[in-house]
Amino acid sequence: MSRTSPLTRELIGEFAGTFILIIFGTAAVAQMVVSGGDAGDWATLTWGWVAGLIMGIYVAGRLGAGHLNPVVTLAMAVYRKLPWRNVLPYTAAQTLGAFVAALVTRGVYNAGIVAVDPGLTSKSQTIFSTLPNHGVTTAFFDQVVGTALLVFVLFALLATLQGAASMLLPFMVGLLLLGIGFAWGTNAGYAINPARDFGPRLAEWITGYHSAWVTPDGTPYWWLPIVAPAIGALIGGGLYVLVIERFEVPAAQDEPVPAPTPESAEAGANADPRHPVNAADVVVPDQSKEASR
């Protein structure tokens, strides 16, 4: 372990954490699709993604950052001094983790998928990748807004949950995803993560989904969950810096005032209000005279 570079450990963590995120999320959707809704609905699949994100961050956090999302990595490089040399390796590890997880879900649920969708069409494609429900334009703005919210609130959580409270960060980020899913999910499936969409989309394409890159009407769509979240992440991070961060109280001024000791409290209670106790009032015995007695 001592010979493993910090970047290598972080990449392993990003791969493993994203794998956990995607395998929980895609399997939750698959369960709903192959059962015809008898074993799941919108709420259960949303909670499946939330569980995957929380557990994935905990897993990845053991080895590094735990971004699990290329546009979060991008925002951290732009606004939080993450080395730019880490951006592409992080993105590759996250996308690979998503790809492998989708292959596992595809294999485990293959019989059920083929039973409900023998032609491997858009009917079951959403197990793995997202599609627009109200047009490409609406989906684009939906992804910009959703990802901007993700990064804006994430920066606030990172600034707030320090020290021992940082252990709550994965849970709070999970609640953030839950809110986005319940509020913004219907337009485009709330991908808000290029690795989450592109990795599984590639997996479904190589396993028989010939229309994986387009919408049901043939419109190229694979690029949208990459470009729109990147724009949204930059907007969300920039707004946080502009609206919140520059008005924050410096950490030194924000520290709580220490509680008074019993001695200082007693001195304050007994002090003459016309002549407060200060350092000049304290008489320090002369130790040399005490020793000569």
Image (tube, rainbow, N blue to C red):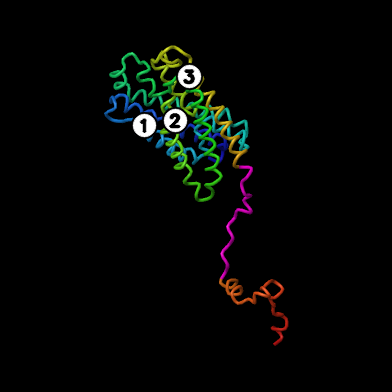
> Residue 238: x and y, percent?
60, 34
Q: Is residue 258 magenta?
A: yes
User: Label 3, label 2: how many angstroms apart (C-alpha)?
Assistant: 15 Å
- Between 66 and 191, the one lying in front of the other is 191
Dot 1 corresponds to which residue? 45
Residue 79 in the figure: left or right of residue 229: right
Instruction: Label 2: state its secondary structure.
Output: helix
Dot 3 corresponds to which residue? 136
By secondary structure, the bulk of the magenta-drawn segment is best described as loop
User: Label 2, label 1: how many angstroms apart (C-alpha)?
Assistant: 14 Å
> Residue 36: x and y, percent?
28, 24
The amino acid type found where label 3 is placed reads Val
- Between 222 and 239, the one lying in front of the other is 239
- Between 217 and 128, the one lying in front of the other is 217
Dot 2 corresponds to which residue? 184
Instruction: Label 3: state its secondary structure.
Output: helix
2 or 1: mark nearer the eye: 2
First in sequence: mark 3 or mark 2?
Answer: 3
First in sequence: mark 1 or mark 3?
Answer: 1
- Identify whether 84 is placed above or below 248: above
Residue 49 in the figure: left or right of residue 12: left
Confirm or deny contact between disc 3 and disc 2 (CB under 8 A). Answer: no
User: Label 1, label 3: how many angstroms apart (C-alpha)?
Assistant: 23 Å
Q: Residue furthest left?
A: 38
Q: What residue is at 41 percent from the left and 27 percent from the top?
A: 186
Q: What residue is at 50 percent from the left and 46 percent from the top?
A: 166
